[in-house]
Amino acid sequence: MANKEKKLALIDGSAYFYRAYHALPPLKNSKGQETGAIHGFITAIHKLIADFKPSNIAMIFDPKGPNFRHEIYPDYKANREAMPDELVSQIQLLYKALDYNGLKPIIIEGYEADDVIGTLTKKFKDEIEILIFSGDKDFSQLVDERVSIINPVTYKPLDHNGVFEKFNVYPKEFIDFLALVGDKSDNIPGVDGIGPKTASSLIRKFGSAENIIKNADKITGKNKEKIKNSQ
């Protein structure tokens, strides 16, 4: 039986690091080394620990270079700018600071932090409550009675009902939802002309993206052609 008193905090370290970099003015130490993002990151983690009191913490970061998604879709995240030099210069110092404080960064070559967080969530959610600290909407697919997403700015949790209120689909339907609307932040196109409202309506009626395609002839109006043209 799961111990309800225990909580595992899975922290999207890369996202937190970027957020810390943009949230604070440039800071340097006595040697002239940029330290603003490190300071902001550590401050945010201290607040997280104080507010949520997790019994366990895993700090996950993206590795350098492309991953398997780029092999499938070369334009994956092609709209993203490279990490600023001011941030690159701080990343190794951050890793050392975290390691020194007993929070050894988890970095798996070839896999994004999202993938690792998803794997850890599925592996441990039956044993311990999972809190995912990230602003990435993709994690919505993982939410259930044992898994919540915590917004890194507001610290407001997103639970099962919260996902539905925000996207008008349930967590188990979220992958199908993204397949229809795409993901601009990752440069992934969806079905041309299908927005969130139409996507959620089609999912409500047909249940999944696969069933929507199979039943395209039953869809009325212009949406029928939009679905057919996307295949």
Image (cartoon, helix red, strand yellow):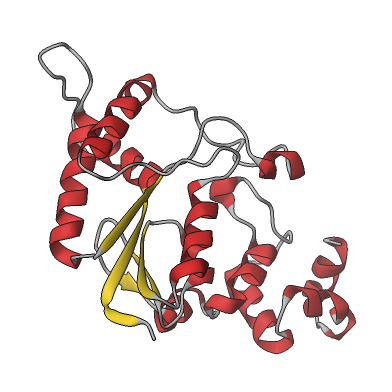
Please tell me in which quadrant of the rendered image residue 94 appears: top left
Q: Position of residue 25 (x, y in %)?
A: 18, 30
Q: Position of residue 87 (x, y in %)?
A: 34, 26
The answer to whether residue 196 is above or below residue 164 is above
Q: Position of residue 231 (x, y in %)?
A: 86, 62
The answer to whether residue 209 is above or below residue 117 is below
Q: Residue at x 13, y 60 (%)?
A: 50
Q: In the orientation shown, which residue stands out farthest toward the front?
A: 1
Q: Residue at x 73, y 43 (%)?
A: 73
Between residue 203 and residue 102, name the one nearer to us.
Answer: 102
Q: In the drawing, does residue 51 fall left or right of residue 61?
A: left
Q: Residue at x 56, y 37 (%)?
A: 109
The answer to whether residue 1 is above or below residue 117 is below
Q: Position of residue 24 (x, y in %)?
A: 19, 35
Q: Residue at x 81, y 82 (%)?
A: 219
Q: In the drawing, does residue 34 fall left or right of residue 128?
A: left
Between residue 124 and residue 28, name the one nearer to us.
Answer: 124
Pick the quarter of the image with the N terminus: bottom left
> Exactly how many numbered labels are in the figure?
0
